[in-house]
Image (spheres, rainbow, N blue to C red):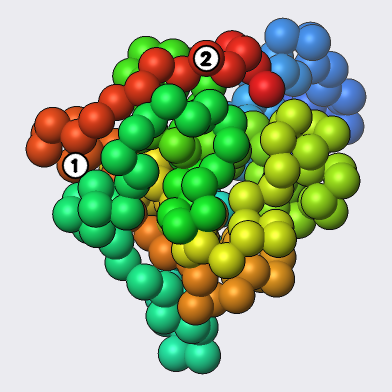
Amino acid sequence: MASLISLRRPLTGLASRATKPHTLTPIAATSALLPRHFGTLLHTPRVTPRTAAAAAPPLKPVFAQSIRRNSDNSGEPTLRKWGFEDINAALPSETASPTHSPQSKLILVDVREPAELTATGIIPSAVSVPLSSQPDALFLTADEFETRFGFPKPGEGQTGDVVFYCKAGVRARIAAQLAVQAGYDPARVGVYLGSWLDWAERGGRVEKWEGPENE
């Protein structure tokens, strides 16, 4: 009998503890949830330079895409490449003519920006048609072009070759491609590949640019 009573007491104690509601304090509840939930919710994959580059490939410049697209396309017309001797021989012997009036034999188009021309000068007889700030210039009508720039559109009503140059030849190639797209005869469009850097290095003639700072 005594043994039965001793067994009943532990069982009764266990039952009472099991049925008694267990209350958690806010701190205890938070502590219980933190390891499980925050470990899942706040876990973020580690980003390394390799994975970042794969997720967001670098954007390619529009000009570079244009050059590559036209270079890879075998259907594009081949533009004449001009060198220092070609340009120098085609320039007029006298440079007194206004630099804003293209020559009929050779129409030189400088596509650098006004600040560059102010700093270095230009090749005699060249006209300024900045490519970066005036990308639609060659697509304008003759009247629209003259209204904007104050001189006739290069090649309009003329028979000479239209040769583009810039600082190192990159913008000049783009301008020549745009000229063909705008309707210029590819046979008359050329590029001075060495452009200003080559011209200055070889001691070519230079004229001071008298145009405004911003056209």
Q: Cα distance, mark 1 to mark 2?
A: 22 Å
Looking at the rendered structure, the kind of residue marked 2 is: Glu
Quadrant of the snapshot with the N terminus? top right
Position of residue 161 measured from the top left corner of the image (x, y, whole percent): 48, 63
Position of residue 6 relative to residue 73, above or below, is above
**Residue 196, above or below 179:** above
- Percent across and percent down for residue 185 are 60, 75
Q: Is residue 64 visible?
A: no
Horizontal side of 99 relative to 165 (left or right) equals: right
Instruction: Determine crowd level at label 2: few under 14, some 14-19, many 20+ residues with C-alpha closer than 10 A.
Output: some
Residue tagged by mark 2?
210
SS assignment at label 1 = helix
**x 69%, y 53%: residue:** 138
Residue at image mark 1:
198
- Residue 45 position, x and y percent, is 48, 44
- SS under mark 2: loop
Is disc 1 surrounded by few (<14), some (14 to 19) or many (20+) residues within 10 Å? some
The residue at 79%/10% (across/down) is 25
